[in-house]
Amino acid sequence: MIAFDTNLLVRHLTQDDPAQAAKVARVLADAADRAELVLLTDIVLCETAWVLTRFYEVKRVDLLKALERVLADAQFAFQNRSEVDAALHASRAGKGHFADYLIAALAISAGCRTTYTFEKGLAASAGFTRL
């Protein structure tokens, strides 16, 4: 198994730098030839979501579709797949950011009864308690 940093996943999704995107495609092809998975850690997924919305101005619905495509790609492995799935599901229904929901999903998985937050948009979301 190998792992990708945020910038490789962003290049893969946006194809905004042809030279770098081609390098990413070569790494993916080489990994596929070796039947090797590419790990996307939780932090890489959160950073990717932040970069795409903040700097690329990707709309929420398009971000969620991009994350769904990544999750559906058999070449990628995930640090906490079920929690990422839960965060994506919560993101579709809620007002918070993907990273917020992943924080809550990871906390629940670790045995926490709630995640405290100051975020108003998360007040009605399962797994959060607003202060």
Image (cartoon, grey):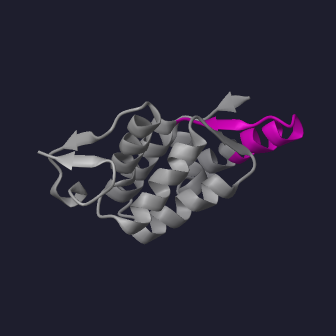
| 93 sits left or right of 131 in the view | right
Whether residue 6 is situated above or below residue 16 in the rendered picture: above
| 101 sits left or right of 74 in the view | left
Q: Residue 96: horizontal and vertical position, in percent? A: 30, 57
Q: Residue 67, located in which quarter of the rendered image?
A: bottom right
Q: Foreground: 20 or 131?
A: 131
Q: Residue furthest left?
A: 131
Q: Quadrant of the C terminus?
A: top left
Q: Quadrant of the N terminus?
A: top right
Asked whether 34 falls inside the magenta stretch, the response is yes
Q: Residue 111: horizontal and vertical position, in percent? A: 41, 32
Whether residue 63 is situated above or below residue 23 in the rendered picture: below
Going 41% across and 39% down the picture, which residue do you hit? Answer: 108
Asked whether 3 falls inside the magenta stretch, the response is no
Going 21% across and 47% down the picture, which residue do you hit? Answer: 129
Going 44% across and 30% down the picture, which residue do you hit? Answer: 110
Q: Residue 114: horizontal and vertical position, in percent? A: 29, 41
Q: Is residue 99 visible in the rendered structure shown here?
A: yes
Whether residue 107 is situated above or below residue 96 in the rendered picture: above
Q: Foreground: 116 or 55?
A: 116
Q: Foreground: 83 or 70?
A: 83
Going 53% across and 66% down the picture, which residue do you hit? Answer: 65
Segment tinted magenta in the rendering: 25-41
Q: Is residue 10 visible in the rendered structure shown here?
A: no
| 103 sits left or right of 36 in the view | left
Q: How many marks?
A: 0
Q: Residue 45: horizontal and vertical position, in percent? A: 49, 44
| 58 sits left or right of 24 in the view | left
